[in-house]
Amino acid sequence: ALVLAIYLGRRRGYEKTSYRIHNIPFVVLGAALLWFGWYGFNAGSALAADGLAAHAFMTTSVSAATALLSWMLIDTVKDGKPTLVGASTGLVVGLVAITPGAGFVPIWASFIIGALVSPICYFMMNIIKHKLKIDDALDAFGCHGIGGIWGGIATGLFGQSSINSVAQWDGLVFGETRLFTAQIISILVTIAIAVVGSLICIGIIRIFTKLRVDEKDEIRGLDVTQHGEQAYPSFNGFD
């Protein structure tokens, strides 16, 4: 997402136009569906209805709920009141952050993971992105990229082999360094693969089609120029 956002550049009028949330009820509905589905993703990864699945279910719940409250607190401190969109965003980053370690970290650690992911992602989304002037419209990198990186690091900090024997070593807070080192290396390798893979995909796609619309098409609107229809046509009685 970050590679493509940088490559494509910013939308026309990015620094001058005020972009609003399109449909807040749908944002909440989508976040709720994600939360429900994420249990199948994390707890279901145990491939059995056993204690490990129940553990992953609990860590997922705790991290998501803690991150939701953490983001609400940030909104309250910054703007004086919490927002539904902020709460939904916190919920999602909490799910993202716990995923690497859902079946490996203690339940108490999921409180820490969820509490810290919101300020980390908030900082990236609202400060770093604007300073670097990156137009990541859905904050895919700020939420999923940064949240996932923190989750990978947290797994190296809090992972326990006693919870899941797949983990060969305990995390850094338990006095071992090997798991933490392996997680850091894995994160760096993943970033390299994602960057190189994205650049390759960009190169291939450019052979067949352009990646960005013409300026005049962007001005007219993509609904009309790319799809030949409008989501919300205006009716005046003569249409």
Image (tube, rainbow, N blue to C red):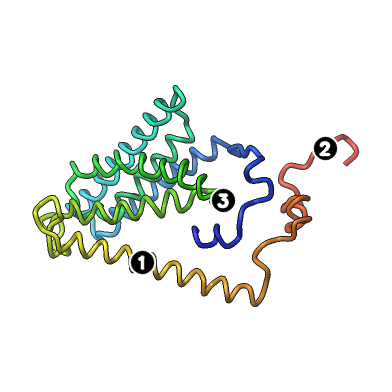
Residue occupying the point 45% across, 72% down: 196
Left or right position of 168 against 187 = left
> Rounded to the nearest whole Å, what is the CA distance between mark 2 and mark 1?
50 Å
- Residue that mark 1 sits on: 190
Residue occupying the point 60% across, 73% down: 205
Q: What is the three-letter code of the residue carrying label 2?
A: Phe
> Rounded to the nearest whole Å, what is the CA distance between mark 3 and mark 1?
23 Å
> Rounded to the nearest whole Å, what is the CA distance between mark 3 and mark 2?
33 Å
Image quarter of residue 217: bottom right
How packed mark 2 is, by other alpha carbons closer than 10 Å (few <14, some 14-19, many 20 or more), is: few
Image quarter of residue 233: top right
Going from N to C along the chain, the mark reached first, 3 or 2, is 3
How packed mark 1 is, by other alpha carbons closer than 10 Å (few <14, some 14-19, many 20 or more), is: few
In the foreground, 39 or 118 = 118
Going from N to C along the chain, the mark reached first, 3 or 1, is 3
- Residue that mark 3 sits on: 135
Image quarter of residue 45: bottom left
Left or right position of 193 against 100 = right
- Residue that mark 2 sits on: 235
In the foreground, 55 or 207 = 207
Which percent across, then down, holds residue 137? 56, 49
Q: Secondary structure at mark 1?
A: helix
In the foreground, 106 or 79 = 79
Q: What is the three-letter code of the residue carrying label 3?
A: Asp
Going from N to C along the chain, the mark reached first, 2 or 1, is 1
Q: From the image, state whether disc 2 or disc 1 is nearer to you.
A: 1
Which percent across, then down, holds residue 187? 32, 63
Which percent across, then down, holds residue 153? 26, 55
Q: Would you say the residues marked 3 and 1 are in contact, meaning their CB atoms lie under 8 Å apart?
A: no
